Image (tube, rainbow, N blue to C red):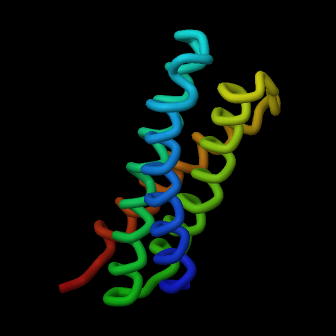
């Protein structure tokens, strides 16, 4: 699980940097301000959760535990769903309905699971 989360964090981080460059050089001249705002939100969430995935991978290797596995899985799936849906909306005008809110809810669950892992950690 640690390798999966580390790989996902690396891909999410690298992808966020690449998308930020594309946003500045390719998309800024072509997208409306509302679409750019959506893109910026997705990129910020993706970059933040890339770091969260890496942190959970490190904590999982050190502490283990079901709460950390839940946090990692929620961050992974939540980032894919939320950022994917928002990016698709911003870049292609396609709405996936409740996918972005579902992804956002999973991200919140991930943070709560991380809190639970910290609160129940002994030593």
Residue 86 figure quarter? top right
Q: Is residue 112 above or below residue 114?
A: above
Q: Residue furthest left?
A: 123
- Which corner quadrant of the image does residue 102 belong to? top right
**Which of the two residues, 37 or 30, is positioned nearer the viewer here?**
30
Q: Is residue 97 left or right of residue 55?
A: right
| Residue 14 drawn above or below residue 25 | below
Q: Position of residue 80 (x, y in %)?
A: 65, 53
Q: How many numbered marks, from 0 up?
A: 0
User: Percent from the top left, x then y, of residue 4?
Assistant: 57, 80
Residue located 40% across and 82% down the image:
60
Which quadrant holds the C terminus? bottom left
The location of residue 2, given as percent across then percent down, is 48, 84
Q: Position of residue 19 (x, y in %)?
A: 52, 44
Q: Residue at x 58, y 60 (%)?
A: 74
Q: Nearer the viewer, residue 30 or 69?
A: 30
Position of 89 with respect to 105 (left or right) is: right
Residue at horizontal 30 percent and vertical 68 percent from the top: 118
- Quadrant containing the N terminus in the rendered view: bottom right
Seen from this angle, which residue lies furthest top?
33
Camera-nearest residue between 31 and 67: 31
Q: Residue at x 58, y 51 (%)?
A: 79
């Amino acid at each position: 699980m640690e390798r999966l989360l580390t790989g996902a964090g690396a891909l999410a981080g690298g992808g966020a940097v690449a998308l930020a460059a594309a946003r500045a050089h390719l998309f800024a001249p072509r997208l409306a301000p509302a679409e750019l705002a959506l893109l910026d939100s997705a990129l910020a969430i993706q970059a933040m959760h890339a770091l969260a995935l890496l942190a959970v991978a490190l904590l999982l290797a050190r502490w283990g535990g079901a709460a950390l596995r839940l946090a990692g899985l929620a961050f992974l799936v939540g980032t894919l769903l939320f950022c994917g849906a928002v990016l698709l909306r911003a870049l292609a005008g396609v709405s996936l309905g409740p996918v972005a809110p579902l992804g956002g809810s999973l991200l919140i669950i991930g943070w709560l699971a991380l809190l639970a892992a910290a609160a129940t950690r002994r030593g």
